Image: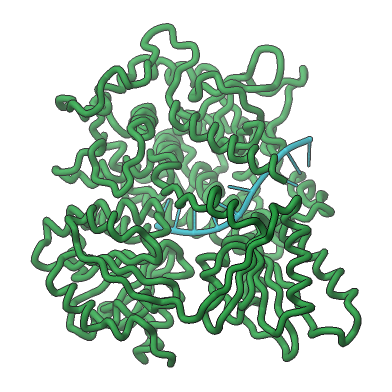
Amino acid sequence: MVSLPIVQYEEKIIETVERNPVVVVIGETGSGKSTQLSQMLHRRGYGKIAVTQPRRVAAVSVARRVAQELGVQLGEEVGYAIRFEDRTSHSTRIKYLTDGVLLRESLANPELREYSVIILDEAHERSLNTDILMGLMKRLVKVRSSDLKVLITSATLDGDKVSKFFADCPVLNIPGKLYPVEVLYSSERPSSYLESSLKTALDIHIHQPEGDILIFMTGQDDIEKLVSKLEDKVRALEEGSCMDAIILPLHGSLPPELQVRVFSPPPPNCRRIIVATNIAETSLTVDGVVVQANQRAGRAGRTCPGKCYRLYPSRVYNDEFLDVTVPEIQRSSLAGSVLYLKSLDLPDIDILKFDFLDPPSFESLQDALKQLFLIDAIDENGAITSFGQKMAELPLEPSLARTLMEANDHGCLSEALTVAAMLSAETTLLPVQRKTEKKRKHSISNLADGSGLGDHIHLLQIYQCWDQSDFDIGWCKDNGLQVRGMLFVRDVRKQLSQIMQKISKGPPDVKANGKREEFRQDYRNLRKALCVGYANQLAERKMHHNGYRTLGFQGQVVQVHPSSVLSLDDQGKFPDYVVYHELIATPRPYMRNVCAVEMRWVIPIINKLKTLDVYKLSSGGMHHVEEEPVKNLPDLPKKDVEVPSTADDRESRIQAARERFLARKGKK
DNA sequence: GAGCACTGC
């Protein structure tokens, strides 16, 4: 085995950990920190060690490698835990797990006494879960000062910032780059990145010695175009003029069996040209890559020297590309995280003053509080309700958790479970769509059309059809649904159902299999439950056309997404009110996954909005503290609510996303 | 008739 750089630092690392409760380890890709740190501490007799990873594949593959290095059976001394898969046992001493799983564990056991060491790996990725864990660790090292060690590891994270966050804890730098990577820039900005990538890749293929090429593109669409163009060009090359080449696409919606092709070595005298999304940036390491046609130099130089071609001038790179990733916590809805933190009931944690490495804006916290209030997860003073406590147990966004609670009280839990599970997997359900195959959708819509009521009902009906086929794999294939996506839905549904059984007072309504609602055809109870859950995601149709105005966004005009199955009435009109699952930020904002609701269900929500007092919500029912002057709070309508505003900050984030999108389009 | 990507419980 090649000796990893980190091994030389073992004494130094151990010594620093012995003396400090928190240590930051900065190690570049290839330093071996993910596999070696846990083993070092294990050798020195530390107790059970948890190592978090932001992604499932990473948790599994790193655990597998460490078990192999230690010569033990996976699941014994070394194991992993990801959603739906716990491969650990009583003898497990080193446990790899996703950050989400550790957060769930900390809900059941806030002090995490099971572990002597907690390593938050890949913290530079700034996943929302890791960010929250960092805040919790800061508190935990105080509570468990004598028997807990915390390590924060990262490739590029600003070590000083994290150190400062953890009371000036020590920072260890482990050099890791094994081989040099030469970086080459284009002299000017290309008019088309696609054409420029094509030209550069061919040029490299024809003129450079052997070694694989990795090209980064922004999306599946461009990947498919580039792959087909590359195939044409390579085929057209004169026989024997240069080595062979195989072109491999790589992106998230590619089935796993096609993804793994990039791990098998090419035939002799053949160069692989891999065209990937940023999935290859972090999730997967492709051996043999020596040349890249875009910006991620870290992926080359792993096993031998490499080259990185940047298809734009260095000035562009320096001026426009060096923004550090905006942490997830500063761009996404915080309702789920806020509810989670409130449910922990830590006496010394005030959500508005929770110690984040990069605090989210005051507005987005308030936005989250407003949403939680609207769905009864917190009371008017901002304190978590018993309802909210139960919702936090569910691994769902609060809107869907609330929908399940409501459905359970109105005899349609079975259907609601299905809808929530289908939405959890929605992106992996549909097959890789090619522009040439549009017909597929119709085959399933004969069986399930949403009864005109929208996409939630559509998803429910698809699952019910599959259920009636006895979960036949062939049925999925015949109807153009991804098998692994549907199996995932079934797992999620089962998990949600078990949690609902645990938390509901009476026996939950899960056995009914949806017969009653099915016969009703109008799915009224289910839609009402969705309306209650999506109280913050309501839209009202504009008087004279089919555009909508969101009630949550100050009069923002949105359209129903073209993929929606929602039908028009005799007059060619959409329903007066809908709830939506998400808004997509494109030049024209779209609601994706909508469900028709009735005005009489909307009225109580509007009324509740009138009672909303954001000042009380955010003061947590206690005296408000100085730092945020009242005049900075957004004005909330207390009377005559026509266009209630509950998501001002999110609106500005959507706006910013739109501007970024437009700017990108403009450049093309 | 338009769709940025990726990840997690």
**Which residue ends up furthest to the top in the rendered image?**
A640
Q: Position of residue A128 (x, y in %)?
A: 39, 51
Q: Which residue is drawn at 37% across and 69% down?
A: A81
Q: In which quarter of the image is residue A242?
A: bottom right
Q: Residue at x 35, y 44 (%)?
A: A337
Is A507 or A108 nearer to us in this picture? A108
Q: Position of residue A15 (x, y in %)?
A: 16, 78
Is A101 or B3 nearer to us in this picture? B3
Q: Which residue is drawn at 18% across and 26% down?
A: A626
Is A166 or A116 nearer to us in this picture? A166
Q: The green chain is which one?
A: A
Answer left or right for A579 relative to A373.
right
Quarter of the image with the N terminus of chain A is bottom left
Question: Is residue A262 something one can see in this rendering?
Answer: yes
Q: Chain B in the picture: what colour? A: cyan
Q: In which quarter of the image is residue A167?
A: bottom left
**Depicted A209 relative to depicted B8: above or below:** below
Q: How many marks?
A: 0
Q: Where is residue A570 in the image (x, y as percent from the top left)?
A: 77, 20
